[in-house]
Amino acid sequence: MAESRGTFVGVSSHGQLRYSTNGTAWTSTPSGTPSALHAVTYGNGRFVAVGNEGALVMSKDGVNWSSLNSRTDQRLRGITFGSGIFVTVGYAGTILTSRDGVRWKRRHSGTELRLQGVAYGNGTFVAVGWDGLILWSREGSKWKRCESGTSEHLRRVAFANTLPAINVLETGLTNFNPNFYRINSL
């Protein structure tokens, strides 16, 4: 879910998005793609949502959406905005970045593993994925691997009190403190 100026936007299956101006009453709106959407964020004056088959859609108001060319057919699973940059991640180690949310550039992740989530906080982008994969980047273009100490599939990442917290398969939040202290001290 993403929010800007009192408009909340959430993703749904079959290319649908939902928006609300009060967080209680929600309205469905078409996105311009038939693909399932998995994540949405807000930055640089626009909402951007991503999903299956490289689906990437954009809206300035959260109501009217247009489809964009992501230049990939990989499933995109997570998106974030930080430090003036959108970052989306997906299957086969896919990482794409954009300053404007319209023109996207593929970045080298160094992996073919599935990436599931990405977040920005404390001046760092962190992406997580299958087999305990954690990648991090200060600027979004060059990514480094960080040992997680697990081979579990990592699903989501979010920042809390400047440290990332990771969701391992829906079992709850686990904080891998030693690795993240190392990341934040680089």
Image: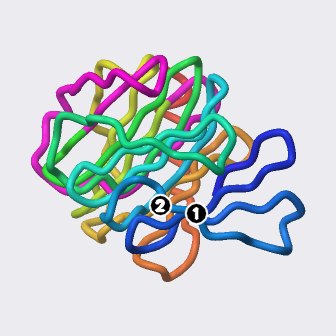
Q: Is 86 or 144 nearer to us in this picture?
A: 86
Residue 42 in the image, given as x and y percentages of width and height: 63, 38
Seen as rendered, the residue at the extreme bottom is: 171
Is 112 inside the magenta-drawn segment?
yes
**Which structural element holds mark 1?**
strand
The figure's colour scheme reads rainbow
Q: Is residue 85 above or below residue 40?
A: above
Q: Which residue in the protein does label 1 denote?
A: 29
For marks 1 and 2 on the same chain, the one whose residue lies earlier in the sequence: 1
Residue sitting at 36 percent across and 52 percent down?
128
Q: CA distance from mark 1 to mark 2?
A: 26 Å
Tell me the quadrant of the picture where the N terminus can be found. Answer: bottom right
Residue 43 in view, yes or no: yes
Q: Is 109 or 90 nearer to us in this picture?
A: 90
Residue 149 in the image, given as x and y percentages of width and height: 33, 58
Q: Is residue 25 left or right of residue 102?
A: right
Using the rendered view, name the quadrant where residue 163 is placed.
top right
**Which structural element holds mark 2?**
strand
Q: Which residue in the protein does label 2 denote?
A: 156
Residue sitting at 21 percent across and 27 percent down?
106
Is 12 inside the magenta-drawn segment?
no
Of tags 1 and 2, the one toward the viewer is 1
Label disc, if present, on residue 184 of the rendered structure: none
Q: Is 111 or 106 nearer to us in this picture?
A: 106
| Residue type at numbered disc 1 | Thr
| Residue type at numbered disc 2 | Arg
Residue sitting at 42 percent across and 33 percent down?
87
Q: Is residue 96 left or right of residue 78?
A: left
Using the rendered view, name the quadrant where residue 135 is placed.
top left
